[in-house]
Amino acid sequence: MGNIFKQWLILLLIVILPACNNAVSRLYGIRSSKFLDDNEIAALANKFKISDGIYTLDTNFISALNNFEYSEQLKNNPGPHPVKYKFRQPLLIVVFNNATGRQLSFLNNCYAPGFPNLKWRTKNNMQHFPAIGGTPTDTLVNLNDIVTYLKPIQAATLKEKKYSMLVFWNQYLGRQTGRYLNEVHSYIIKNKVKDISDIYYVNNDNFLYAIEHNR
């Protein structure tokens, strides 16, 4: 747990402290946040060998996350809620049950310890489907809550499978993104994920840029 907390703290500092950006981000290969147009996202997807199911996350999802903090379910738990912060992480995999819309598993970069490279297979995180993640699931954000904010760049052909797997990726985390997506591609093949799950590759560069620049 200590290593996970340390990893989470480092990544949080990278996001919020310019001085930390200058010192630590270079070691992780982290780049400056950028607002990308559709052509740039498509080109980046091609670089990372993503051929279909390409989406971008609308920046209005920031407001939606803020609203979840004040939802009926949180009246007895006032103050900042982890739902908001776990979706603000740069790299994450979320699996939903299509019938219920509920989250089945949630894995983000906070639970991929390692320096100077994140290790996604720690504690068998990506050995089986759905991916085992240390990040708790929640009942606040369901599949439709996110799909509403996805803009297709090259939409997937959805076949009403049992599950939906959302893979969030970006240029922001530089080489970490490349390593992460290599793990994801291998994981999908090994577990035959395409046979049982629709897959959305969600670029969140514009979302992260808007958070950083308060837009």
Image (tube, grey):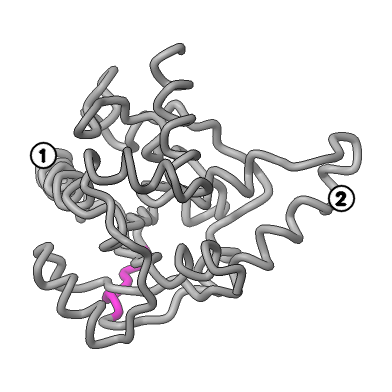
Locate residue 139, reporting x and y percent.
Answer: 66, 44
Looking at the rendering, the stretch of residues picked out in magenta corresponds to 155-160
Q: Residues within 10 Å of mark 1 (few under 14, many from 20)?
A: few
Which of pointers 1 and 2 indicates the residue nearer the eye? 2
Q: As displayed, is residue 26 above or below residue 169?
A: above
Position of 124 with respect to 186 (left or right) is right
- Element on which disc 1 rests: helix
As measured in the structure, the alpha-carbon distance from the residue carrying label 1 to the one carrying label 2 is 40 Å
Whether residue 199 is visible to the viewer of this picture, yes or no, is: no
- Element on which disc 2 rests: helix
**Residue for point 30% across, 79% down:** 155
In the picture, the disc for residue 72 is 2
**Residue for point 25% across, 77% down:** 41
Q: Residues within 10 Å of mark 2 (few under 14, many from 20)?
A: few
Considering depth in this image, is 9 or 198 the residue closer to the camera? 9
**Residue for point 24% across, 27% down:** 115
* Tally of numbered tags: 2
Q: Mark 2 is on which residue type?
A: Glu
For disc 1, the marked residue is 190
Most distant residue in the top direction: 2
Q: Mark 1 is on which residue type?
A: Lys
Whether residue 105 is visible to the viewer of this picture, yes or no, is: yes
Which circle's residue, 1 or 2, is located before the other in the chain?
A: 2
Q: Is residue 159 magenta?
A: yes
Q: Residue 79 lies in what quarter of the image?
A: top right
Considering depth in this image, is 194 or 56 the residue closer to the camera? 56
Q: Residue 174 lies in what quarter of the image?
A: bottom left
Locate residue 133, reporting x and y percent.
Answer: 40, 30
Position of 8 with respect to 100 (left or right) is left
Q: Is residue 87 magenta?
A: no
Tell me the quadrant of the picture where the C terminus can be found.
Answer: bottom right
> Main structural element of the magenta stretch: helix, strand or loop?
loop
